[in-house]
Amino acid sequence: MYVQSIEGDNTTPYPALDQMTDNPFHLAEDHSKNSVMLTLASGILSDEQFYIISLFMIYVSQIINMCAIIANSLSIAVFVKLGFSEPSNISLTALAVCDLTLGVLSTWSNLCFWLTYHDVRLPFDSANVSYLTGGIQWPFLSSTIAWITAFISFERCLCILVPLKVRRLITPRGTFAGMLIIILLTFCPSFFTFIRYKFVWVFNPYLNVTILSTIPVNSELAILFEKISFTICGVIQPLLAFSILLICTVLLVVQLRKISSWRMSVTSAKSQRVQPEQNPGASSSAAEARISQKEERLVRMVVAIATIFIVSYIPNCIMLLCFVVFDEFAMFGAYRRISVVSSYITSLGQPISGSINIIIYYKMASKFRSVFRRLVRLDRQEQA
């Protein structure tokens, strides 16, 4: 879908998405207030630079998304075979399902933008339709993943802090209910954005055909509802989940160090043949820090998952804050090109995190490793 050059009648081989006159979002904007900012922004990235960078990031993102889709599909298959008698299997499966959904949505959005860049003639406006069917759900799903990861970390904190009561506090049924509540409060509100936008058939003068596209509903109530839902579910909720996850991860690391110190002291005491009655301090610390080695391995696995998620999610948090603080940094604002390129870069973090999780499961969970090897027939290959 090529556009006319501003200075002449020649067309540019690079689709300047921010200059498309058939873009309904573009038509709804008022550029009279930010014409200077648009001029400055257009000088930061030319059409050619924007095209090359965006296309390169699309290819990179697609490769990572495919890895995430394959990895999380295998993880879900393994957890299904393991069963859901353990609460941790339920929450980890929910995390894998959300990571898989994120990979699918990202793949769909990248495909639509690729079609737009290459001027593929389709019966729908790929850029606008993908925004409403994939791009707009992305921050909400990121919030869901953040809350599920925070829930998993909080669950492990309870296992360490109150090991004798955790069986009554964390049950498979309660964990399943918790996953449903998280999804309902974080991801499902994304569908309310259809109050703000709707699908319509519009005439495309470049193709000389009527195609499916989207237009915004410019009522004050719809605009207010969109801002409130995005601010709460797309910004406040993920940042709050990120804070809870960070606190729980720090607590888990501190408790793991205490457990390691306690185990070393117990080993030293046994080597010196000291009876527990002769060392009441050791018994007291044992009562506070004692968890099974199986639980300790699970805690270490959760710490690894949470740490990778925190590192990968920090750029996304910065982007969310930029969207809230700087209006011109929005998807269709004056600095839309910088916003698009930045979004491509920051959006790579979570698919990478979702792809790495299966490696952590394989390395740190013996049951997962055993079922995974049987699933992909590795054991039979070694025996052969």
Image (spheres, helix red, strand yellow):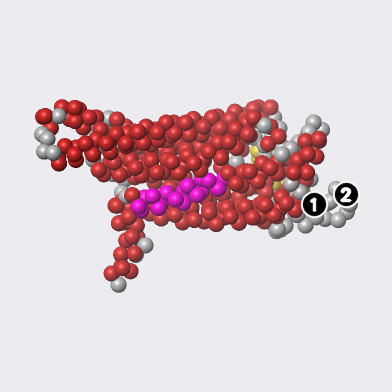
**In x, y percent, where is residue 75?**
39, 52
Q: Which residues are magenta?
A: 347-363
Q: Residue furthest bottom?
A: 384
The residue labelled by disc 2 is 7
Q: In the image, 53: left or right of 316? A: right
Residue sitting nearer the eye, 213 or 379? 379
Q: Residue at x 80, y 39 (%)?
A: 39
Residue 344 part of the magenta-drawn span: no
User: In the structure shown, which secondary structural element does the residue marked by tag 2 occupy?
Assistant: loop
> 219 or 371: which is nearer to us?
371
Kindly tell me whether residue 175 is visible in this rendering: yes
Question: Where is the N terminus found, in terms of image quarters?
Answer: bottom right
Q: Residue at x 69, y 54 (%)?
A: 52
Frontmost of labels 2 and 1 is 2
Q: Residue beneath label 1, please?
A: 3
Q: Is residue 350 magenta?
A: yes
* Type of amino acid under label 2: Glu
Q: Position of residue 71 (x, y in %)?
A: 44, 54
In the image, what residue type sits under mark 1? Val
Residue density around tag 1, few if under 14, some if 14–19, many if 20 or more, within 10 Å: some
Q: Is residue 301 left or right of residue 238?
A: left
